[in-house]
Amino acid sequence: MGSRRLSLSWTGLAPFFIYTALFLFLPTAIILVGSLTDKDGNFTLVNFGPDGIAQSYLLRTLLASLQISAVSGLVGAVAGALLAYAVSTGNPRGVLRRTVTSASGVLAQFGGVTLAFAFIATIGPASFIYETMKDRGVDFYANGVWLYELSGITLIYLYFQIPLMVIVFLPAVDGIRPQWREATESLGGNTWHYWRYVAGPLLAPSFLGCALLLFANSFSAYATAAALITQAGPIVPLQISNLLTSETGRAQPGLAKALALAMIVVVLVVMSLYTLLQRRTSNWLR
């Protein structure tokens, strides 16, 4: 009887395992095999050597992606955490909280071509805001159109990074009990002591975990940057796209897969750390 129950429970999870195998493990296996073979199907490690992803322009691309992800993740985490704390101090059922959380849920999913077009239309070199500011002597494109560069991508990524931080960090902030501040004050502590010894250490694992989630979210983003930048490939996802459609990619088809495998490794490490930090946070949220 016990074994029958166990088999039935595993049967209920079968659709999940099938979905995971088809859309996660199978593509990863294809990328792994492709990165270790040449165009003739022979085993090779050249895609990971000096003639592979260790080439200078690909390393610069990888470093640029890491830089954009780190900056947008950190700035988005700090701004989102402050906004989440401000929302948590209000009425749990108030209009402000419901409005912010609803808007965050929508904006966190807003990206791709529509987001790139929104920024181009709003602050682009032909936008009404830019022309108005320029007529008043403020030309924020005097040194070049930075909106189409890495700094512009970072700014645009913050548009969905901050709302995402609000969504994932708000439960941790809500877990802080008002009685803990009262207990700190009753023992002679002030606001600094409360944040330094009570709230800060409790929220730190969740904050770091959410920052890592934002890092992975930015590192794997493609559509927005692809719509904004049409030349070269300053970040890894765009470089992979270029390799798949260029003559270099046809001559060395495993190079794009090797670069994709490097992305998978980075995201896997980041998400593993995120899981560990979230597990630690869940211990005191129970």
Image: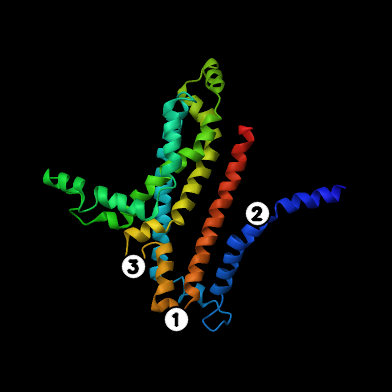
The residue carrying mark 3 is: 232
Q: Nearer the viewer, residue 182 or 116?
A: 116
Residue type (three-letter) at the residue carrying disc 2: Phe
Name the residue rendered at 50%, 43% in the picture: 210
Horizontal side, residue 242 vs residue 137: left or right: right
Q: Report how far apart the C-alphas of labels 3 and 1 lie in the structure.
A: 18 Å
Name the residue rendered at 80%, 52% in the picture: 7
Q: Report how far apart the C-alphas of labels 2 and 3 lie in the structure.
A: 38 Å
Name the residue rendered at 48%, 76% in the picture: 253
Q: Nearer the viewer, residue 3 or 162?
A: 3
Number of the label disc, if any, that sits on residue 16: 2
Q: To which quarter of the image does residue 16 belong?
A: bottom right
Residue type (three-letter) at the residue carrying disc 1: Ala
**Can residue 170 be seen from the camera position used here?**
yes
Residue type (three-letter) at the residue carrying disc 3: Ala
**Can residue 77 be seen from the camera position used here?**
no
Residue at the extreme bottom of the image, as rendered: 40
Number of the label disc, if any, that sits on residue 194: none
Mark 3 residue element = loop
Mark 2 residue element = helix
Q: To which quarter of the image does residue 280 belong?
A: top right
Q: Residue 218: image x %, image y %?
A: 44, 53
How many C-alpha atoms fall within 10 Å of the one at disc 1: few (<14), some, or many (≥20)? few
As displayed, is residue 207 above or below residue 53? above
Q: How is the image coloured?
A: rainbow
How many C-alpha atoms fall within 10 Å of the one at disc 2: few (<14), some, or many (≥20)? few
As displayed, is residue 37 above or below residue 24? below
The residue carrying mark 1 is: 251
Q: Residue 75: image x %, image y %?
A: 39, 44
